[in-house]
Image (cartoon, rainbow, N blue to C red):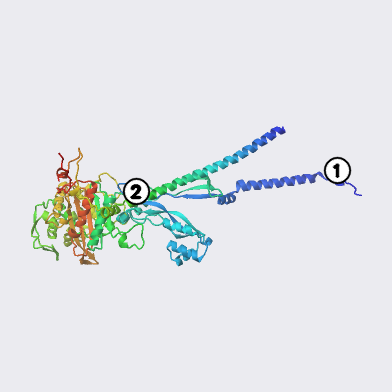
Amino acid sequence: MNKSLAYTSSPLLAARTPVWRSKFIVGAIALGFVALAARAVWIQVLSNDFFQKQGEVRFERKLELPANRGRILDRNGLMLATSVPVPSIWAMPEDMERDPRKLAQLAKVLELPLPELEKKLQDEDKSFVWLKRQVDDEVAKRVAQLDVKGVYQRKEYQRRYPEGEAAAHIVGFTNVEDHGQEGMELAFDKQLAGRPGSRRVIKDRLGRIVEDVGEQVPPVDGRDLQLSIDSKVQFFAYQKLRDAVIENKAKAGSVVVLDVASGEVLALANYPSYAPNRRQNLTGAQLRNRALTDTFEPGSTMKPFVISLAMEKGLVRPETTIQTSPGRLTIGGSTISDSHAHGLLTVNEIIQKSSNIGTVKIAMQMQPRDMWEMFSEVGLGQKPQVPFPGAVSGKLRAYKTWRPIEQATMSYGYGLSVSLFQLARAYTVFGRDGDIAQVSLLKSGDAAAGVRVIDPATAQAVRHMLHLVTLAGGTAPKAQTMGYSVGGKTGTAYKQEGKGYDEKKYRGVFVGIAPIEKPRIVVAVMIDEPSAGKYFGGDVAAPVFSATVQQTLRMLGVQPDMNVKPQVVVERVEESF
Amino acid sequence: MTRLNLALLIALLASALYLVHTQYESRRLFAELDKAMSDARKLDIERERLQVEKRAQATPSRVEKLAKEQLQMRTASPAITQYVTLRGAVPGTASEQAGQP
């Protein structure tokens, strides 16, 4: 019934088809392959950007290699500032779970008000928002324990300042982005900041790095910065200053300690200060580095320069006598007076007792131009050559505009302004036998190059006068310190308020040198508006000088040059027979 | 001929598998190396952190406070210091009279 049909005997096969048809099929298939090959070449070789990118997105990662910010060290290599990584908390708002209870907990742990936290999460950027940067390890741990979805942590560098407020003004601080904002952190930001590197890697499914791709850019760490500051001297200077400001109910104060030989700044402190690690609610008064950025009328501290100039000109010698009685002198309609009438004084005594009349009488024998040159040579009216942001030049008017009364007042320090730093530097003239030191905030160690201003003999004579100031009969016996001979000059100036002087507001200044025979340091102290009764520089600033000199020389290992009654208790055991 | 082909096929397969293995090993070792390096970095950071902490514990302000309050010490002064001059150094004035109770 079913008739088998052998394949071979299919009638279709028997039918002859034209040869072109099979050739056409072969050709069409070949064409298809060529098209595929061409497409493959196109995708894999010629135009592979898109796919390459897609591939990279899936397994390649670019890693940022953070660079360390350089450390700031003191002259002995002790740390003044360094960076340590601390956790910062961030969130991905679009992923975040909005459980009100958890949010409240999170806000509590982060010490943020809840509305503020909610506001942060509603910000435009849905994929990234900082919740709180640079938190304590403890806080980070508790955030991790809360385990809120969409909240993450990453490490950020935070600056630490172990010396705290004592060195705050000189070291400065950085902002949350690790850029210098104040002080040396700002001045040397470029050197301190590192350059972050990067590397491209392939990560596997588990997030492990399995291969480097392409070139690595290694991070360049910032270079360390070694300051000339000695952290111990700095601390003691700050401490003594702080105590004095508080005791005298003063508004503020500054102290500068310079190394005479090298011109290095051993300490530079201001009060009020601040803790650089906790900078909430900072006031401008706390932030100001008064020693460098505030100028004031230097008052009597200018007198030694006028006297040394007069000695250089051969007008006076230390023993020359000048009549200062009756304690009043009228020049161009204005009257100059001494606080006490002194009568006949030698030049030595004019400095020792700080007589305005005596100084003016000597100054008026000189040309304004000579005085101006003297003041300029010791750095007044010029910006100090230190790389400190905001260092000011003070004011010294051109001598051509000086009226006689102005020349007279300038001789005792009114009508020009200086910063305490400039004043300290100017006194290196006397400390270095007549040449003024180049000052430096960075450690150099070498003797500083100096510029000759006055004759060594003059400098020594003036040093002797400065020594007299601190002896009985001088204006600053409180500057004396045990074991070391000192010399210096007091200055008490009315503060300028608006156009005139406020006769109830003072500034007490003391600048001095120690030890007086072989000077090692210059210390300048300024107390602003002491209001606890005492206001003379010799009463408010000299004690700070005395204490600072004592500590600094001890730490520098300088042997006392004066006889001290030793109080060394030696226990003696009776010899037994 | 067939035998040679077979042998070559097996050799090819073996080499391919070995390649896979080597690649795997290399990635594993690389991951290990990378982890070791990141550990080194972490330790470095930890060291820096501890150094700061050590420094913060030894600041002059803290040392002085502890010395004064807990140990009842006082600041040294020239009166209670014996100065010793090294041979060859310039003799100081204080050393000559120091040391005699």
Q: Which residue is mark 1?
A: A8
Q: Quadrant of the N terminus of chain B?
A: top right
Q: Which mark is residue A198?
A: none
Left or right: A472 as drawn, with respect to A396: left
- Place residue A296 in its image quadrant: bottom left
The percent coordinates of residue A397 (x first, y second) are 23, 59
> Residue A263: in sight, yes or no?
yes
Amino acid type shown at disc 1: Thr
Q: Of helix, strand and loop, which one carries label 1?
A: helix
Q: Are marks 2 and 1 on the same chain?
A: yes
The percent coordinates of residue A1 (x first, y second) are 92, 49
- Circle 2 chain: A
- Circle 1 chain: A
Q: Nearer the viewer, residue A371 or A433?
A: A433
Q: Earlier in the sequence, mark 2 or mark 1?
A: 1
- Place residue A271 in its image quadrant: bottom left
Q: Nearer the viewer, residue A498 or A571?
A: A571
> Residue A375: in sight, yes or no?
no
The percent coordinates of residue A6 (x first, y second) are 87, 44
Amino acid type shown at disc 2: Leu
Q: Which residue is mark 2?
A: A225
Up-down: is A236 above or below A115?
A: above
